[in-house]
Amino acid sequence: MSAEVAEVQVSLDGGVGRIVLNRPRALNSLTHGMITALHATLTDWATDDGVRTVVLTGAGERGLCAGADIRALHDDAKAGGAGARAFFRDEYRLNALIARYPKPYVAVMDGITMGGGVGLSAHGAVRIVTERSTVAMPETRIGLVPDVGGSRLLALAPGELGTHLGLTSASMGPGDALLCGFADHFVPSARIPALLDALAGGSDPAAAVAGHAEPAPSAALAEQRGWIDACYAADTVEEIVERLLNSGVAEAKEAGEAVLDNSPTAVKVTLAALRRARTLPSLEAVLDQEYRVSCAALAAHDLVEGIRAQVIDKDREPRWSPATLGEVGEADVARFLAPRGDDELGLA
């Protein structure tokens, strides 16, 4: 068995197709080979009468999936980005397949579930979080923009919660993930094995989850809706930051500082992308937009620099270019959202 196939473990268990992301030392981060294997498996199972339900989990104790292998993304972007563009194209097509999957697709978002991990789970029919779940779209921290359909999830979150999460790269606990529409059910991690056994025994997914779920934990963001909705309703990132810093609320000030720490270009493009995502008719249309944005990011300065600072050198001191919000003009943002001619995803 090749290394690529081994990174995705596939099995059948009583009519349940089990998919286990199997790179635990790398927090199950996604390679292109894993994306290809997942797409092929799900396509086969879609018409296989022996597969009643699909269940996605991650190997190890730390999480479902931390997202794409951003070291590989960094290296490919420096070399021109052709491989990364192909990765994004196949990844976003996989996200669309999961969202329209004809059979129950159960995603167990136990532990860290970020970026590409959200794309594999939060578009599924049955989305489960546990007390260990940490869910996030942290792209602006590395000079990227929320993708894998995440900009649609953020755009549809209550009020301006999604704008807050997208611009700051903040994480959600299980209660916040449920509040923001990234998950449906809370099941304690200790009950996950019994839930999987019930599914393998023939239980309907809805009944199996109902038999093991508990009431949702409290959502920290619910108590902060007042300042979040007021501050992030502004039309520009500059005004949002001004409102956050001057609100008199300690958490708002921290959020404003977090926005200023992230890539100025990425946060401006993120705000524009989220506002547009609210008006787009489907996930597929949002994925088309995200492909344009991600390809543009590959050719820009901040993605390589952000990954260098956060992951390669780990100095946590990215040198963004442009360095300030004021230096990022409307034309700069428009370039990220512009059609790419023959190089379009074309899902919508």
Image (spheres, rainbow, N blue to C red):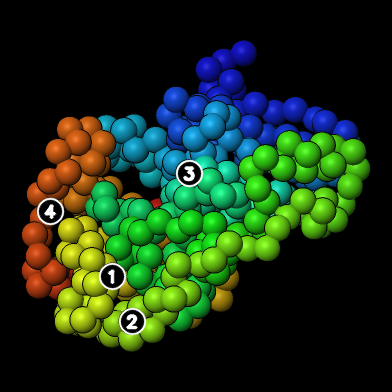
Give residue 213's quadrant in the image: bottom right
Q: Is residue 175 above or below residue 7?
A: below
N-term mark: 4 or 2: 2
The answer to whether residue 79 is above or below residue 116 is: above
Dot 4 or dot 1: first in sequence order is: 1
Q: How far apart are marks 4 and 1 (CA)?
A: 25 Å
204 lies left or right of 256: right
Q: What residue did someone put label 2 on? A: 227
**Residue at image x 82%, y 31%?**
13
Residue where numbered disc 4 is placed: 320
Could you say which is closer to the camera, residue 142 or residue 329?
A: 142
- The local secondary structure at tag 1 comes to helix
Which comes before the other along the chain, label 4 or label 3? 3
Task: Measure the alpha-carbon separation of dots 2 and 3.
Answer: 27 Å
Residue 251 - label: 1
Q: Which amino acid does label 4 sit on?
A: Trp
Separation of marks 4 and 3 at Cα, in angstroms: 27 Å
Q: Which one is in front, 220 or 55?
A: 220
- The reply to whether discs 1 and 2 touch (Cβ–Cβ < 8 Å) is yes
Quarter location, residue 168: bottom left
119 to 82, vertically: above or below: below
Q: Nearer the viewer, residue 216 or 51?
A: 216
Q: Which amino acid is tagged 3? A: Ile
Query: How packed is label 3: few (under 14 Cα within 10 Å), some, or many (20 or more)?
Result: many
Q: Residue at x 21, y 46 (%)?
A: 306
Q: Which residue bears the numbered disc 3?
A: 112
Marks 3/1: CA–CA distance: 23 Å
Q: Name the secondary structure under disc 4.
A: loop
Q: How far apart are marks 1 and 2 (CA)?
A: 9 Å
Q: In this view, does 233 lie above or below 70?
A: below
Please state which amino acid type lies under the numbered disc 1: Glu
